[in-house]
Image (cartoon, grey):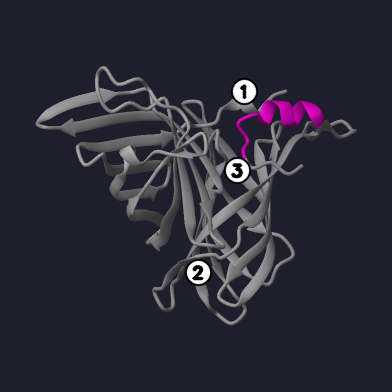
Amino acid sequence: MKKKSIFYIAAIAAAAGLSACGGDDPTYEVKFTEPTVNVVTNRNSGVTVISSAPSLNQYRFDLVKNKVAVDIAGLTLGEENIAIGIEDITLLSQSGAFQFKGGKKVGSNYDITGYSGVLYDAGVVSSFDIVTPRTSSYLVTTYPQVILFRKTSTQVVSDGNVYNWDGTVCTLKLIPSTMKATLVLDNVTFAERMPALSGMTFDGLNIKADGTGIDIENEKFIPTISDTPYPRYEITDFEAELKGSDIEITFTCMGTYNVTIKAKMQAGSSTQLGA
């Protein structure tokens, strides 16, 4: 079942993903598939790139045995496009967040080690090492293609005044084929008496790999709201850094409001995996 986000994972499970197998030791699996953006570091050369196309990763959570299996289709390593599988990954729960580690490769001549992942509302963030038959070594870090950030804090500095706002919701869409990103800000405001804006869209942002994360930037552009350009809200000096589950965004709006938004992905929980 193809989903860009697992924010409604319970509905997915209820519809088709939750199944019981017969026998004395039944297993209950929740399955979902998502497009995943891959940051690939070639450990031989030290070069880090973002794969030009997302891989399609299927995750199978066994809620009885506390195991996870992952099938990855369309992973690009250099000039190779491969499909790999990892099974018998241990599912952990810490403070309501689902983490999973370890595992063993399935039917592959690639060596895969160090797999770890965390389930978020937006999807799975994971990393693993892989060595190809030609002894090329890579570190792969994965992100959902569409990421929703709800745990946000916004600080705006203007003419020496500081304004804080905690209600902003950020949605980031990564487009590796064009090395661009789109950021949508909902319920965002830059001053105490300024009405909150929704659907404020920053399009055509440039992305590049940085270590195991993603840098996003654009020098100057006009945002849109409900597909309408708003030149008076011109954005300058936009920069963002995505590292793991955290993002920090800075930009200037209208040449006056210096904005910093810090946000985290919201961790997934057992309620997402139970119909």
The three-letter amino acid code for the residue at tag 3 is Thr
Label 1: element kind: helix
Q: Disc 1 residue type?
A: Thr
- The answer for how far apart the CA atoms under marks 2 and 3 are is 23 Å
The reply to whether the C-beta atoms of the residues labelled 1 and 3 are less than 8 Å apart is no
Identity of the residue furthest to the top in this view: 193
Disc nearest the viewer among 1 and 3: 1
- The crowd level at tag 2 (other Cα within 10 Å; few <14, some 14-19, many 20+) is many
Camera-nearest residue between 167 and 264: 167
Q: Nearer the viewer, residue 79 or 208?
A: 208
- Say which residue appears at 41% left-offset and 25% top-offset: 187
Q: Is residue 4 above or below residue 47?
A: above
Asked if the magenta segment contains residue 221, the reply would be: no
Earlier in the chain: of badge 2 and badge 3, it is: 3
Residue that appears at 74% across and 30% down: 13
Which residue is tagged 1? Answer: 271
Q: CA distance from mark 1 to mark 3?
A: 19 Å
Residue 263 placed where, x, y %?
37, 35
Q: Is residue 25 visible?
A: no
Q: Which residue is mark 2?
A: 138
Which is nearer the N-term, disc 1 or disc 2? 2
Quadrant location, the N terminus: top right
Q: Position of residue 56 (x, y in %)?
A: 67, 54
Q: Amino acid at mark 2?
A: Tyr
Nearest to N terminus: mark 1 or mark 3: 3
Q: Label 1 to label 2, Cα distance in Å?
A: 34 Å
User: Which region shows up in magenta?
Assistant: 5-15
